[in-house]
């Protein structure tokens, strides 16, 4: 529903607006990362913010993800609210010790007397021809780590609201921004608002099968649903938004209603988040309502190729979702 102060802006602009408004509101919020100041970030998200907030709050760092994560963890421990940027999600591997063994565990190890309110912003996913070392989706690694929250918004509205919630959270939050979503547009209110972490949303009502998706797979699933609707197949599309904490209630309710579920994500199938989602459904009351086996549609177990045709074939596209959902809807009938 459109609000009086709502206008159409891009996903990228929504992220920038969330950062800007929170920095104006709370002086403890600051940014740090490679080329985020003068250059404005690898994708231009922080462009213009150095001029408003200065180099103390928009900090260009050395080319060291370990240093960025370590500095952010220390600053958070001392009462600041850092938002660190990892230029490509692939480079987060260099900061795993600081994030997994320090930031994620400090609050627990100190019995709640210390907290780490920090956000790890990072562009993820393929589709830009950036090849194997700049196109990965590594969310499953962090979902497996207690103490870190993981969100992956699919719309500009959610990008702003979830980022504000992540900044205000007292735990480390991994905030995944898919590169292909940056230029997408949608209605976003000008005022401050937040979306609670751990709440999925039903993007499309349906009766024949549930599609669970997040990030760039949400618009692809919605497009697939529109195509199948012309064949008389009605998909229910759930945008998970928050992967950890996970809204299990919305998932269980939808699957119990439709009796079929297709889980779609870009990350490789083996060890991917889809396996956890399948287990959640299998262990819930929704299992008794299933009319067909749980199906997963995920990225191939290969590094992302540079060749554009091969890159496209490596991860689910709209036509793949259409084919998988069509087969699922007809299974067992």
Image (cartoon, rainbow, N blue to C red):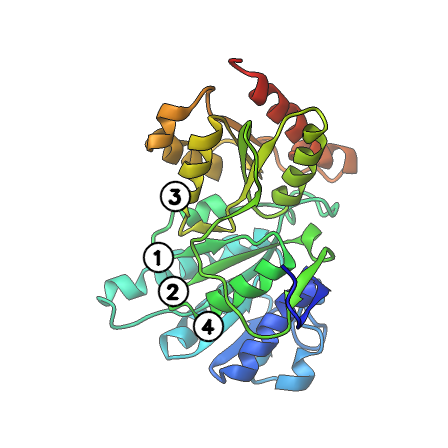
State yes or no: discs 3 and 2 in contact (Cβ < 8 Å): no
In this view, 67 is above or below 306:
below
The extreme top residue here reads 333
Q: Which residue is mark 2?
A: 171
Mark 1 vs mark 2: which is more N-terminal? 1
Residue 216: percent from left, percent from top? 64, 46
Q: Which residue is mark 3?
A: 249
Residue 258: percent from left, percent from top? 49, 29
Give the left or right position of residue 144, taking residue 120 as reference: left
Residue 71: mark: 4
- Label 4: few (<14), some or many (≥20) within 10 Å? some
Which tag is nearer the camera, tag 1 or tag 4? 1
| Residue plotted at (45% across, 53% down) | 199
**Mark 1 to mark 4: distance in Å?**
18 Å
| Residue plotted at (54% across, 29% down) | 209
- Label 2: few (<14), some or many (≥20) within 10 Å? many
**Mark 1 to mark 2: distance in Å?**
7 Å
Residue 147: mark: 1
State yes or no: discs 1 and 3 in contact (Cβ < 8 Å): no
Mark 4 vs mark 2: which is more N-terminal? 4
Residue 282: percent from left, percent from top? 37, 29
Give the left or right position of residue 311, taking residue 238 as reference: right
- Label 3: few (<14), some or many (≥20) within 10 Å? few
Which tag is nearer the camera, tag 4 or tag 2? 2
Q: Dot 3 lies on which element? A: helix
Q: Is residue 131 visible?
A: yes
Q: Dot 2 lies on which element? A: loop
């Amino acid at each position: 529903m459109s609000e009086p102060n709502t206008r159409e802006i891009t996903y990228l602009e929504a992220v920038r607006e969330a950062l800007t408004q929170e920095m104006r509101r709370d002086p403890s919020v600051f940014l740090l990362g490679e080329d985020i100041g003068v250059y404005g970030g690898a994708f231009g998200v922080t462009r213009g913010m150095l001029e408003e907030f200065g180099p103390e709050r928009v900090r260009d760092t050395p080319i060291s993800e370990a240093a960025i994560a370590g500095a952010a963890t220390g600053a958070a421990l001392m009462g600041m609210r850092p938002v660190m940027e990892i230029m490509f999600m692939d480079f987060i591997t260099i900061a795993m010790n600081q994030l997994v063994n320090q930031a994620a565990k400090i609050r627990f190890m100190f019995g709640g007397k210390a907290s780490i309110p920090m956000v790890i912003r990072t562009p993820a996913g393929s589709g830009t021809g950036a090849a194997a070392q700049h196109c990965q989706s590594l969310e499953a690694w962090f979902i497996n780590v207690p103490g870190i929250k993981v969100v992956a918004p699919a719309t500009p509205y959610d990008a702003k609201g979830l980022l504000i919630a992540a900044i205000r959270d007292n735990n480390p939050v991994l905030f995944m921004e898919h590169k292909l979503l940056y230029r997408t547009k949608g209605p976003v209110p000008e005022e401050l608002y937040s979306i609670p972490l751990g709440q999925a949303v039903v993007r499309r009502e349906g009766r024949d099968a549930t599609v669970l998706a997040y990030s760039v797979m949400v618009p692809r699933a919605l497009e697939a649903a529109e195509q199948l609707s012309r064949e008389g197949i009605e998909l229910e599309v759930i945008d998970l938004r928050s992967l950890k904490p996970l809204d299990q209630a919305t998932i269980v309710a939808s699957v119990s209603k439709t009796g079929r579920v297709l889980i779609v994500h870009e990350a490789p199938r083996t060890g991917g988040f889809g396996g956890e989602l399948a287990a959640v459904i299998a262990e819930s009351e929704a299992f008794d309502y299933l009319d067909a086996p749980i199906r997963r549609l995920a990225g191939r177990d290969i590094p992302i190729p540079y060749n554009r045709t091969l890159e496209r074939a490596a991860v689910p596209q709209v036509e793949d979702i259409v084919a998988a959902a069509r087969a699922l809807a007809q299974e067992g009938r």
